Image (spheres, rainbow, N blue to C red):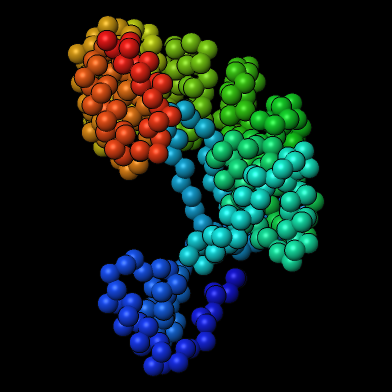
Amino acid sequence: MVNSPTLSSKPNQAESQETKTSLLNTQRPVSLTEAKMLLQPSLHHHKASLSSTISYSHSVPWKTPKSTLHQTVNYKILPVITCSISQIHNYGTVDYERRPMIKWNALYRRISLMENPELGSGSVLNQWENEGKRPTKWELCRVVKELRKYKRYQQALEVYDWMKNRQERFRLSPSDAAIQLDLIAKVRGVSTAEDFFTSLPSTFKDRRVYGALLNAYVRNRMREKAETLIDEMRDKGYVSHALPFNVMMTLYMNIKEYDKVDLMISEMNEKNIKLDIYSYNIWLSSCGSQGSADKMEQVYEQMKSDRSINPNWTTFSTMATMYIKMGQFEKAEDCLRKVESRITGRDRIPYHYLLSLYGNVGNKEEVYRVWNIYKSIFPQYSKSWLPCYYLISGSAG
């Protein structure tokens, strides 16, 4: 168990009270350090602590000790358009509030900005340790997560290679093995990923690791291998949820075998496996790709009647795209209005779709309107979009 950080020694009481009074009366934003000063008495007297999720995890694949108690931070990754393996990181550490961000962030920057990438992430990590800094597994996994986010797969894999060479310090789980397999497939090829999969002990080959290999096959459109693997997953009971079906449906969409998408949906229904939002969106796309507006609308009606599903902006951008291909522009514009009504937070991607699809519909006024909204929300990105904007406006006019 990692100990919670101790509070600093008490300041002079008079000075502390005067400082707090000044902070309370100021109109400027209060910094994190100042906020901690204001809260310090209650933290000190009540011994406030932040809870962490406790879970059990396997140990290193190349060593097989007993289950190890870990504190974990859970991350939920929501894919926007395509379906992918679950990227759940079993970090085995305390939550963000207790773990200073600056440490992993500084290490991430040093790796991502190194002058000679050929030296590899390992050289940066060795230098980091030579400076007296000792990274934890949580920090390294957080660095890997960020590197993957920006598609720096080679550097992310090198971090795992560095950990693997220090087995006495870093206990890796099946979740780590799944991430490694995914990175190996992207950096060194599917064949090397298959060798890695074969080398793992059977206790590590859970649904996440199988899912990572399935995803690698689908990404490379290896239909026969994907179908063989999912049959093996069926035998092991690993196909009891929507994700592997979504991955296979993505494959069939990519190779334009839309009838296979229907078979996947039928199998899910027969086995009482609930469709998730990605299942429905892929199914909608399949129906639309076959030129059947009626089938697509039937799927949408079923989607609306499913109380566990809330159609998102991707649902309506998919339907709008299909209506445009069928020449049904009025229905397409109705879907685009629904796209806009479902944008949440500071997500730029829906606006990209709106600009493009309104341009395809030929509605120049809507292109301008959405563009002005985009500029007001994301002024730092608006200049980079000018060429695309003029291109879309030209096609709309």
Can the viewer see residue 39? yes
Residue 255 position in % (x across, y down): 52, 12
Q: Is residue 65 visible?
A: no
Residue at image location 27% in from the left, 33% down from the top: 373
Is residue 260 depicted above or below 277 in this figure? above
Give the percent coordinates (x, y) of residue 35.
39, 73
Identity of the residue drawn at 23% across and 33% down: 341
Look at the image and tell me in which quarter the C terminus lies. Answer: top left
> How many marks on residues?
0
Return the residue nearer the eye: 176 or 12: 12
* Residue 235 or residue 321, whichever sits in front: 321
65 left or right, relative to 258 = right
Quadrant in the rendering for residue 309: top left
Asked if 387 appears above or below 240 in the picture, the reply is: above
Q: Is residue 348 left or right of residue 209?
A: left
The picture places residue 52, in percent across and down from the top left corner, at 49, 65
Identity of the residue drawn at 38% across and 11% down: 289
Which quadrant of the view contains residue 187? Answer: top right
